[in-house]
Image (cartoon, rainbow, N blue to C red):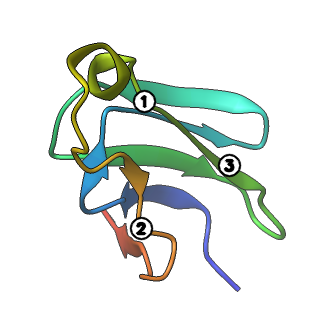
Amino acid sequence: MLEKGKWTLDLGEVHDFAEVFCNSQSCGVKLWGPFRFELPLKIGANIIQVAVTNSLANQMDDLALPSGMDMSRTCRLASLL
């Protein structure tokens, strides 16, 4: 179980936009890296949600650039205490 305090979530490589929510509270939106977010964790269970949104650049430019987030890897969570 995590202790209450300041924690940082590092999403690693994300293509386009990322927004993180902790217990239904937005922790911010990042348009470019580093994709690190401070999380206001509470004692007990916490719900962390990540929303990744890509742009229409690939479709408009007829490209196949990376898009979204690699869900096969683990994000890092570190204490700031």
Q: Which residue is mark 3?
A: 49
Give the residue at x 25% y 26%.
62
Give the residue at x 21% y 34%.
63
Q: Residue furthest front?
A: 62
Q: Residue furthest right?
A: 45
The kind of residue tagged 3 is: Gln
- Which is in the foreground here, disc 2 or disc 3? 2
Q: Position of residue 23 (x, y in %)?
A: 77, 43
Split into 4 quadrants, where in the image is the N terminus?
bottom right
Whether residue 9 sits left or right of residue 40 in the image: it is: left
Split into 4 quadrants, where in the image is the C terminus?
bottom left
Of 36 and 81, the residue lying toward us? 36
Of 37 and 18, the residue lying toward us? 18
Of 62 and 41, the residue lying toward us? 62
Give the residue at x 38% y 21%.
55
CB within 8 Å, label 1 to label 2: no
Is label 3 in a helix, a strand or a loop? strand
Q: Position of residue 59 (x, y in %)?
A: 36, 22
The circle drawn on residue 70 is 2
Q: CA distance from mark 2 to mark 3?
A: 15 Å
Dot 3 crowding, Cα within 10 Å, few <14, some 14–19, many 20+:
some
Q: Earlier in the sequence, mark 1 or mark 2?
A: 1
The kind of residue tagged 2 is: Asp
Q: CA distance from mark 1 to mark 3?
A: 17 Å
Q: CA distance from mark 1 to mark 2?
A: 13 Å
- Which is in the foreground here, disc 1 or disc 3? 1
Query: Where is residue 56, by image quadrant?
Result: top left
